[in-house]
Amino acid sequence: MHKLRFVVRWVWLVSGCLLALVTVPVGSATAGEVGSAHLLRALVVQPDPDGGVRATATLLFPGGPAVLQSILSEYRKWPELFETRMRVAQVEERDGRVLTDIYISHALLPGEQRLLCESQALPGGGLITHLKGGDFTRYHREWKLQPAGDGTQTRAEFDLLVEVKTLVPDWLVAVAMERELNTHFRLVRERALDRITKER
Protein backbone atom coordinates (compact mmCIF):
# COMPACT_ATOMS: atom_id res chain seq x y z
CA MET A 1 0.00 0.00 0.00
CA HIS A 2 2.85 2.37 0.87
CA LYS A 3 4.53 1.65 -2.46
CA LEU A 4 1.26 2.26 -4.30
CA ARG A 5 0.84 5.64 -2.61
CA PHE A 6 4.37 6.59 -3.61
CA VAL A 7 3.72 5.65 -7.25
CA VAL A 8 0.41 7.55 -7.31
CA ARG A 9 2.06 10.63 -5.82
CA TRP A 10 4.90 10.43 -8.33
CA VAL A 11 2.49 10.16 -11.27
CA TRP A 12 0.50 13.12 -9.90
CA LEU A 13 3.64 15.24 -9.60
CA VAL A 14 4.92 14.41 -13.07
CA SER A 15 1.50 15.04 -14.63
CA GLY A 16 1.27 18.41 -12.87
CA CYS A 17 4.79 19.31 -13.98
CA LEU A 18 4.12 18.51 -17.63
CA LEU A 19 0.82 20.40 -17.54
CA ALA A 20 2.57 23.44 -16.07
CA LEU A 21 5.19 23.35 -18.81
CA VAL A 22 2.80 23.01 -21.75
CA THR A 23 0.42 25.68 -20.44
CA VAL A 24 2.93 28.41 -21.37
CA PRO A 25 5.32 27.07 -24.03
CA VAL A 26 8.98 27.95 -23.67
CA GLY A 27 9.95 30.43 -26.34
CA SER A 28 6.50 31.91 -26.76
CA ALA A 29 5.94 35.65 -26.63
CA THR A 30 4.06 35.31 -23.37
CA ALA A 31 7.00 33.56 -21.79
CA GLY A 32 8.52 37.02 -21.35
CA GLU A 33 11.86 36.23 -22.90
CA VAL A 34 14.59 38.84 -22.73
CA GLY A 35 15.58 40.09 -26.18
CA SER A 36 18.98 38.96 -27.44
CA ALA A 37 20.13 42.60 -27.51
CA HIS A 38 19.84 42.66 -23.72
CA LEU A 39 21.75 39.40 -23.17
CA LEU A 40 25.52 39.87 -23.15
CA ARG A 41 25.97 36.21 -22.21
CA ALA A 42 23.12 33.82 -22.88
CA LEU A 43 21.05 32.46 -20.03
CA VAL A 44 22.22 28.92 -19.27
CA VAL A 45 20.10 26.77 -16.95
CA GLN A 46 21.15 23.19 -16.23
CA PRO A 47 21.29 20.58 -13.45
CA ASP A 48 24.24 21.05 -11.10
CA PRO A 49 26.53 18.01 -10.62
CA ASP A 50 26.15 18.30 -6.83
CA GLY A 51 22.36 18.50 -7.00
CA GLY A 52 19.84 21.18 -7.83
CA VAL A 53 19.86 23.57 -10.78
CA ARG A 54 22.29 26.34 -11.68
CA ALA A 55 21.50 29.38 -13.85
CA THR A 56 23.95 31.99 -15.16
CA ALA A 57 23.61 34.99 -17.46
CA THR A 58 25.08 38.40 -18.17
CA LEU A 59 22.53 41.08 -19.00
CA LEU A 60 22.32 44.73 -19.96
CA PHE A 61 19.73 46.83 -18.12
CA PRO A 62 18.69 50.47 -18.60
CA GLY A 63 19.74 52.86 -15.85
CA GLY A 64 22.92 53.00 -13.81
CA PRO A 65 23.85 50.44 -11.12
CA ALA A 66 22.16 52.58 -8.44
CA VAL A 67 18.81 52.06 -10.19
CA LEU A 68 19.21 48.29 -10.31
CA GLN A 69 20.53 48.22 -6.74
CA SER A 70 17.44 50.02 -5.49
CA ILE A 71 15.13 47.59 -7.32
CA LEU A 72 16.90 44.48 -6.03
CA SER A 73 16.89 45.90 -2.49
CA GLU A 74 13.12 46.43 -2.30
CA TYR A 75 12.67 43.16 -0.45
CA ARG A 76 8.95 43.49 0.24
CA LYS A 77 8.35 44.05 -3.48
CA TRP A 78 10.26 40.95 -4.63
CA PRO A 79 7.02 39.09 -5.52
CA GLU A 80 6.29 41.77 -8.14
CA LEU A 81 9.44 40.73 -10.04
CA PHE A 82 8.42 37.09 -10.52
CA GLU A 83 5.57 35.31 -12.28
CA THR A 84 5.57 32.61 -9.59
CA ARG A 85 3.15 33.38 -6.76
CA MET A 86 4.89 34.21 -3.50
CA ARG A 87 4.29 36.17 -0.33
CA VAL A 88 6.73 37.90 1.97
CA ALA A 89 6.02 36.93 5.58
CA GLN A 90 8.84 38.92 7.18
CA VAL A 91 11.72 41.27 6.38
CA GLU A 92 14.25 41.97 9.12
CA GLU A 93 17.27 44.24 8.70
CA ARG A 94 20.25 43.81 10.99
CA ASP A 95 23.88 45.00 10.71
CA GLY A 96 23.80 45.52 6.95
CA ARG A 97 22.13 42.16 6.33
CA VAL A 98 18.50 41.52 5.50
CA LEU A 99 16.62 38.37 6.48
CA THR A 100 13.63 37.55 4.25
CA ASP A 101 11.02 34.91 5.02
CA ILE A 102 9.16 34.04 1.82
CA TYR A 103 6.50 31.45 0.98
CA ILE A 104 6.38 30.31 -2.65
CA SER A 105 3.50 28.59 -4.48
CA HIS A 106 4.79 26.82 -7.59
CA ALA A 107 2.99 24.67 -10.14
CA LEU A 108 5.71 22.00 -9.85
CA LEU A 109 5.38 21.71 -6.08
CA PRO A 110 2.45 20.96 -3.77
CA GLY A 111 1.47 23.64 -1.26
CA GLU A 112 3.76 26.49 -0.22
CA GLN A 113 7.53 26.21 0.00
CA ARG A 114 9.30 28.30 2.62
CA LEU A 115 12.48 30.13 1.63
CA LEU A 116 14.35 31.80 4.48
CA CYS A 117 17.29 33.81 3.14
CA GLU A 118 19.82 36.41 4.13
CA SER A 119 20.86 39.12 1.66
CA GLN A 120 23.73 41.58 1.69
CA ALA A 121 24.77 44.34 -0.71
CA LEU A 122 28.08 43.74 -2.50
CA PRO A 123 30.70 46.50 -2.02
CA GLY A 124 31.18 47.03 -5.77
CA GLY A 125 27.46 46.96 -6.53
CA GLY A 126 25.05 44.08 -6.47
CA LEU A 127 23.38 41.71 -4.05
CA ILE A 128 24.23 38.29 -2.66
CA THR A 129 21.54 36.06 -1.14
CA HIS A 130 22.05 32.72 0.57
CA LEU A 131 19.92 30.12 2.31
CA LYS A 132 19.24 30.23 6.03
CA GLY A 133 16.40 27.71 6.30
CA GLY A 134 13.05 26.49 5.00
CA ASP A 135 12.11 23.88 2.41
CA PHE A 136 15.16 24.31 0.19
CA THR A 137 18.33 22.22 0.37
CA ARG A 138 20.47 24.81 -1.44
CA TYR A 139 19.85 28.40 -2.49
CA HIS A 140 22.46 30.95 -3.52
CA ARG A 141 21.80 33.97 -5.74
CA GLU A 142 24.25 36.64 -6.77
CA TRP A 143 23.83 39.83 -8.79
CA LYS A 144 27.05 41.70 -9.67
CA LEU A 145 26.45 45.17 -11.11
CA GLN A 146 28.80 47.39 -13.12
CA PRO A 147 28.20 50.60 -15.08
CA ALA A 148 28.07 50.12 -18.84
CA GLY A 149 28.39 52.48 -21.78
CA ASP A 150 28.33 56.08 -20.59
CA GLY A 151 27.00 55.05 -17.19
CA THR A 152 23.35 55.11 -18.21
CA GLN A 153 23.22 51.31 -18.40
CA THR A 154 24.15 48.44 -16.12
CA ARG A 155 26.03 45.25 -16.89
CA ALA A 156 24.61 42.60 -14.56
CA GLU A 157 26.16 39.20 -13.94
CA PHE A 158 23.57 36.78 -12.58
CA ASP A 159 24.30 33.46 -10.83
CA LEU A 160 21.67 31.29 -9.15
CA LEU A 161 21.87 27.85 -7.54
CA VAL A 162 18.65 26.23 -6.31
CA GLU A 163 17.84 22.82 -4.87
CA VAL A 164 14.38 22.11 -3.50
CA LYS A 165 13.32 19.18 -1.36
CA THR A 166 11.14 17.52 -4.00
CA LEU A 167 10.66 14.37 -6.08
CA VAL A 168 10.59 16.45 -9.26
CA PRO A 169 13.75 15.73 -11.32
CA ASP A 170 16.29 18.52 -11.71
CA TRP A 171 16.01 18.56 -15.51
CA LEU A 172 12.31 19.38 -15.23
CA VAL A 173 13.00 22.11 -12.69
CA ALA A 174 15.62 23.52 -15.10
CA VAL A 175 13.12 23.75 -17.97
CA ALA A 176 10.62 25.64 -15.82
CA MET A 177 13.31 27.85 -14.29
CA GLU A 178 14.58 29.01 -17.69
CA ARG A 179 11.15 30.33 -18.65
CA GLU A 180 10.60 31.94 -15.25
CA LEU A 181 14.00 33.65 -15.21
CA ASN A 182 13.37 35.15 -18.65
CA THR A 183 10.18 36.61 -17.24
CA HIS A 184 12.03 37.77 -14.12
CA PHE A 185 14.65 39.61 -16.17
CA ARG A 186 11.93 41.24 -18.27
CA LEU A 187 10.08 42.46 -15.18
CA VAL A 188 13.29 43.86 -13.67
CA ARG A 189 14.01 45.63 -16.95
CA GLU A 190 10.50 47.11 -17.06
CA ARG A 191 10.84 48.31 -13.48
CA ALA A 192 14.17 49.97 -14.33
CA LEU A 193 12.72 51.69 -17.40
CA ASP A 194 9.77 52.95 -15.39
CA ARG A 195 12.07 54.28 -12.68
CA ILE A 196 14.43 56.20 -14.94
CA THR A 197 11.47 57.62 -16.89
CA LYS A 198 9.99 59.03 -13.69
CA GLU A 199 13.35 60.50 -12.66
CA ARG A 200 13.64 62.58 -15.84
Image (cartoon, helix red, strand yellow):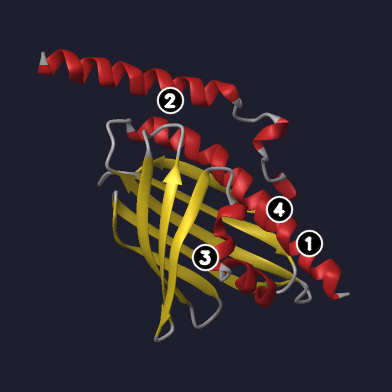
Circles 1 and 4 in contact, beta carbons < 8 Å:
no
Question: Marks 4 and 2: which is nearer the front?
Answer: 2
Secondary structure under tag 4 reads: helix
Disc on the earlier residue, 2 or 3: 2
Q: What residue type is labelled 1?
A: Leu
Circles 3 and 1 in contact, beta carbons < 8 Å:
no
The residue wearing badge 3 is 143
The residue wearing badge 4 is 38
Report how far apart the C-alphas of labels 4 and 2 lie in the structure.
29 Å
Disc on the earlier residue, 1 or 4: 4
Report how far apart the C-alphas of labels 3 and 1 lie in the structure.
18 Å
Disc on the earlier residue, 3 or 1: 3
Question: Residue placed at 50% from the left, 44% from the top?
Answer: 44
Asked if residue 107 is positioned above or below residue 62 in the image, the reply reads above
Question: Marks 4 and 3: which is nearer the front?
Answer: 3
Question: Residue placed at 58% from the left, 23% from the top?
Answer: 23
The residue wearing badge 1 is 193
Q: Which amino acid does label 2 sit on?
A: Cys
Q: What residue type is labelled 4?
A: His
The residue wearing badge 2 is 17
Secondary structure under tag 2 reads: helix
Position in image of residue 35 (x %, y %): 72, 45
Report how far apart the C-alphas of labels 2 and 1 lie in the structure.
34 Å
Disc on the earlier residue, 4 or 2: 2
Within 10 angstroms of label 1, few (less than 14), some, or many (20 or more) residues?
some
The quadrant in which the N terminus is found is top left
Q: Is 57 left or right of 150, judged from the image as shown?
A: left
Report how far apart the C-alphas of labels 2 and 3 lie in the structure.
28 Å
